[in-house]
Image (cartoon, coloured by chain):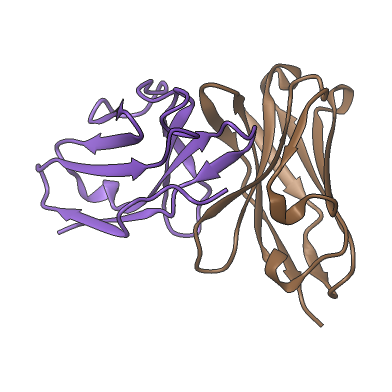
Chain colours: A purple, B brown
């Protein structure tokens, strides 16, 4: 049950796009489409931003999109805004019938 | 209003027990997988356990197997986490969350803090 691999930090200027990667294995990210992404602001509960690889929940900005290729899932945020500054976590089901989060990525809007 | 409210956290000595509760409102609780997620101070999120809609299947992270038990009462719109043999490394904010097994967790509580210390 090793954590999925995410970059510790990414940054971008307002209006730019950033992509956060989430690398797993053939036993988790690569095995199923049960990958979701969560945004967490300081001292707040996480919020679902992308479900089932690329489904955006109602109310989430269309600037957020998700994708997957092989063992790596990605979250792309376009048209960066100051309010996007937060920690982002990926989450995946595994072949061991368990679930695992990524280590988290701190997004800084410059 | 769609809501999950956790309770039951607190300070406990190593080896002690706590029972966390999470009450749902504003949605059809019996149609949701329920999950407990924790976050140690200054650390990332960790999946702890989840339970199928009807309670028939339960899954746990290795570090809590044999010590923690997840359960639910759909008549009371509640999910529970019984935590025994607590260790210092169980210190965290514990969140309950609900969602679909494929989709992810789209409803979250505000969290309850568990501190294991002598």
Residue B19 visible (yes or no): no
How far across and down, in percent of the image, does residue B103 sit? 51, 22
Q: Is residue B18 above or below residue A95?
A: below
Question: Which sits in the foreground, B102 or A77?
Answer: B102
Front-most of residues B80 and B68:
B68
Q: Is residue B60 visible?
A: yes
Q: Residue furthest front?
A: A26
Q: Quadrant of the N terminus of chain B?
A: top right
Is A3 left or right of B113, judged from the image as shown?
left
Q: Position of residue B107 (x, y in %)?
A: 58, 32
Image quadrant where residue B113 sits: bottom right
Residue at x-position 27% and y-position 59%: A9
Residue at 35%, 23% in the rendered image:
A54
Q: Residue at x 17, y 35 (%)?
A: A78
Q: Position of residue A61 (x, y in %)?
A: 29, 29
Horizontal and vertical percent position of residue A64: 27, 31
């Amino acid at each position: 049950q090793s954590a999925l691999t995410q970059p510790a930090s990414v940054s971008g200027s307002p209006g730019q796009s950033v992509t956060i990667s989430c690398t797993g294995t053939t036993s988790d990210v690569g095995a199923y489409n049960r990958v979701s992404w969560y945004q967490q602001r300081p001292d707040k509960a996480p919020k679902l931003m992308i479900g089932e690889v690329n489904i955006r929940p109602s109310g989430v900005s269309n600037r957020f999109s998700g994708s997957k290729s092989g063992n790596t899932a990605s979250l792309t945020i376009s048209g960066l805004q100051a309010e996007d500054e937060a920690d982002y976590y990926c989450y995946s089901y595994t072949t061991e019938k368990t679930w695992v989060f990524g280590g988290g990525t701190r997004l800084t809007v410059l | 209003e769609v809501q999950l409210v956790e309770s039951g956290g607190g300070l406990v000595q190593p080896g002690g027990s706590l029972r966390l509760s999470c009450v749902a409102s504003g949605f059809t609780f019996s149609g949701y997988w329920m999950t407990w997620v924790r976050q140690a101070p200054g650390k990332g999120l960790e999946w702890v356990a989840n339970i199928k809609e009807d309670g028939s299947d339960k899954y746990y992270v290795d570090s809590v197997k044999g010590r923690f038990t997840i359960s639910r009462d759909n008549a009371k719109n509640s999910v529970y986490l019984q935590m025994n043999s607590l260790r210092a490394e169980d210190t965290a904010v514990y969140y309950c969350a609900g969602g679909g097994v494929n989709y992810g967790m789209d409803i979250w509580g505000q969290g309850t803090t568990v501190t294991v210390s002598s």
